[in-house]
Structures are given as C-alpha cells and as structure tokens.
Amino acid sequence: MATIFSKIVSGDIPAYKVAESDRFLAFLDIFPLAEGHVLVVPKVEIDYIFDMDDDLLGEMLVFSKKVAKAMDKVLPCQRVGVAVIGLEVPHAHIHLVPINNVSDIDFSKPKLKLSPEVFEELRLKISSAL
C-alpha cells in the first residue's frame, strides 16, 4: 500500500512543494515544529533510510543541503536542524527544521497550526531562494 508520501509524490495528495528533482521532493510539513519545517523524501518508496543504496542516500543529502541553504536565506533561524526519525511514516524522509535552540527540534512538543496562507507564503519564500 502506498504511503502518504508516495501519494504526495504522485500528486494524489496536495502538498506545499518547495523543491523537486527527478529523484526527490521537498515539501512543508503540515504538522511543523517551526514555521518552514520541510520534509525531504525520495520519490521511490523505501521504508528505512539506511536501506537506501549509497548513491541515492548521498544524493538525498545533497538535495537536502540545497533546500536547507535556501531556508537559511529566508527564515529567521540560527541553523537548519536535521532529523531522521523514521517511525511516523514507512517512507524514508529527512526533517529540515529551522532552529535557534536544541529544544526547537523536540518532536514531543506540540505541533504548530498554520493557515494555508502562511504555508503558501513559506513555500514561496523557500522555493524562491533556491
């Protein structure tokens, strides 16, 4: 059965896409820890990030770096934190989270509730900085 991320990749579920290549997609997390929280996924459905072949994993990190650098340019944060949890959705993904403190990337914190307008504004800011 296709994961929610596969359905986003295929266009069956809408998303606030910030970057896309032939192998990866980056989109805003709809349950973000911070404004601008992005998920990066491979377009091929692989459950566990460390089951990815080395070339694909390396390309995913390079793709994530480009997105993170764009986020650095347009979001008020000291860094873009990186997390790989891998339990929430059985599809490999990287979290890119704007942070100012280590506690900003605590996944047990309540998630933000943002309006569609805020999501769209963030999407445009990040994608335009690529």
Image (spheres, helix red, strand yellow):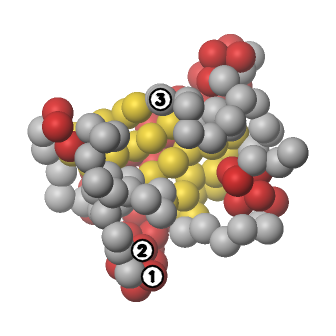
Which quadrant of the figure has residue 106? Answer: top left
Residue to which mark 3 is pinned: 84
Residue in the image at 42% along x and 74% along y: 119
Of residues 58 and 95, the one nearer the viewer is 95
State the image coordinates of residue 126 (x, y, percent, origin top left): 40, 63
Neighbour class for label 1 at 10 Å: few (<14), some, many (≥20)?
few
- Does 114 appear above or below 31? below
- Does 52 appear above or below 129? above
**Rendered-image quadrant of the N terminus:** top right
Of residues 63 and 109, the one nearer the viewer is 109
Residue in the image at 71% along x and 60% along y: 8
Are circles 1 and 2 on residues that touch, CB within 8 Å? yes
**Amino acid at pointer 3:** Val
Which disc number belongs to residue 116?
1
Q: Is residue 73 left or right of residue 58?
A: left
State the image coordinates of residue 108 (x, y, percent, origin top left): 31, 41
**Amino acid at pointer 1:** Pro
Residue to which mark 2 is pinned: 119
State the image coordinates of residue 98 (x, y, percent, origin top left): 27, 49
Which disc number belongs to residue 45?
none
Neighbour class for label 3 at 10 Å: few (<14), some, many (≥20)?
few
State the image coordinates of residue 44 (x, y, percent, origin top left): 79, 39
**How far is the residue under mark 1 from the one under mark 3?**
26 Å
> Counting residues from the N terminus, which is met first, the one under dot 1 or under dot 3?
3
> Counting residues from the N terminus, which is met first, the one under dot 3 or under dot 2?
3
**Amino acid at pointer 2:** Phe
- Res 108 seen here: yes
**How far is the residue under mark 1 from the one under mark 2?**
5 Å
- Does 2 appear above or below 8? above
Q: Is residue 50 left or right of residue 98?
A: right
Secondary-structure class at tag 1: helix
